[in-house]
């Protein structure tokens, strides 16, 4: 009987059928924050802004358990005492990085906070909206920064997540009469804080403990699930449902491990249904031992 070995070796991939979601700080999914904020990832023309916000790694438990994952989308919301408006900003750049600085530890110097894996996830004109002014409950997370075209791989074990936005040209959908107001939290020792400046080219900014509640969509690293059936062993793994190529996972096999291993892509016998791929190996197969791993065509 053939012997099979399965490894969860993953090279920067995402797996789950639907993107997982997380609101940071926690407990604010449907609860309005205790503050409101003008500073945030949007301003009206002719103003500009540089805005950094840090999220504690401890909030990303699922990603930590999976060895990391990909940030797909970030959404913010307006304040219940604010206003609903469309936001069109002709020139915006958004970066994500992994930083050693945690909440309430950010430096006033922007560059001190940026991690070595600093990545531009969005650059260009941003056309979105901000819901606010409904007076009770909480507003919808409608202000969207789509990161799916340049995915950022984040592993909480490496540090905290830094959101870094530069608005070079502010919102042109208003004459400046309608203020942009974000929902915010003002709590010391929570999982967010920020530094910002009303000058997009500033070297330093104002540091405070305020943060904006953020809805984050992400894909965790994939895992091979091994299922023992009557006459076979089934390997299953989830695949992303909507992200662009080459964001794909590939099953590989080898007859040995180590630096000299010859890994080959498994191209036949894989069945995919409802965003789950399955590869079955008959238990009565004979031959040398076999090893399997799941990798990704997308580097971090």
Image (tube, rainbow, N blue to C red):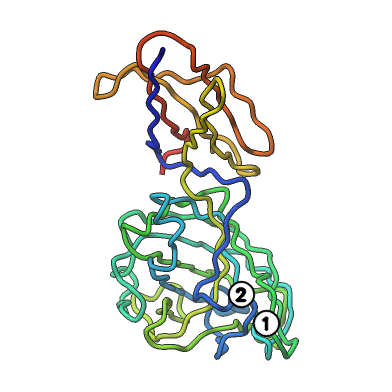
x then y, percent, for residue 268: 57, 16
At 63% across and 65% down in the image, what residue appears?
A: 144
The quadrant the C terminus occupies is: top left
The quadrant the N terminus occupies is: top left
x then y, percent, for residue 70: 48, 51
Foreground of the two, 280 or 141: 280
- The span from disc 2 to disc 1 (Cα, nearest Å) is 8 Å
Q: Is residue 171 depicted above or below 1 in this figure?
A: below
At 34% across and 72% down in the image, what residue appears?
A: 110
Q: Quadrant of residue 176?
A: bottom right
Q: Is residue 147 depicted above or below 206 in this figure?
A: above
Foreground of the two, 68 or 87: 68
Q: Residue furthest top?
A: 287
Which residue is disc 2 drawn over?
29
| Disc 2 and disc 1 in contact, CB within 8 angstroms | yes
At 50% across and 62% down in the image, what residue appears?
A: 94
At 45% across and 78% down in the image, what residue appears?
A: 199
Give residue 138's mark: 1
Foreground of the two, 280 or 109: 280
Q: Give the secondary structure at mark 2.
A: loop
Residues packed near mark 1 inside 10 Å, few (<14), some (14 to 19) or many (20 plus): many
x then y, percent, for residue 14: 51, 44
Q: Give the secondary structure at mark 1.
A: loop
């Amino acid at each position: 009987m053939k012997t099979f070995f399965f490894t969860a070796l993953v090279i920067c991939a995402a797996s789950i059928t639907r993107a997982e979601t997380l609101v940071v700080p926690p407990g604010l999914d449907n609860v309005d924050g205790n503050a409101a904020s003008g500073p945030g990832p949007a301003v009206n023309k002719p103003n500009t802004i540089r805005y950094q916000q840090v999220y504690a790694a401890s909030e990303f438990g699922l990603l930590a358990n999976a060895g990391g994952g990909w940030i797909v989308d970030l959404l913010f919301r307006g304040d219940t005492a604010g206003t609903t408006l469309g936001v069109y900003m002709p020139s915006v750049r958004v970066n994500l990085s992994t930083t050693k600085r945690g909440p309430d530890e950010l430096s006033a110097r922007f560059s001190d906070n940026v991690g070595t894996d600093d990545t531009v996830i969005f650059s260009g004109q941003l056309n979105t909206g901000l819901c606010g002014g409904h007076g009770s409950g909480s507003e919808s997370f409608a202000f969207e920064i789509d990161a799916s075209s340049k995915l950022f791989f984040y592993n909480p074990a490496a540090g905290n997540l830094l959101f870094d936005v530069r608005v070079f040209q502010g919102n042109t959908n208003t004459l400046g009469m309608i203020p942009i107001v974000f929902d915010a939290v003002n709590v010391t020792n929570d999982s967010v804080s920020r530094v910002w400046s009303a000058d997009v080219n500033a070297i330093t900014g104002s540091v405070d403990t305020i943060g904006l509640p953020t809805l984050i969509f992400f894909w965790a690293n994939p895992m091979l699930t091994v299922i023992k059936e009557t006459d076979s062993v089934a390997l299953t793994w989830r695949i992303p449902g909507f992200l662009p190529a080459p964001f794909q996972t590939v099953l590989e096999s080898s007859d040995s491990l180590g630096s000299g291993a010859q890994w080959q892509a498994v191209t036949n016998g894989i069945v995919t249904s409802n965003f789950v791929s399955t590869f079955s190996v008959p238990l009565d197969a004979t031959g040398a031992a076999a090893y399997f791993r799941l990798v990704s065509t997308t580097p971090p």
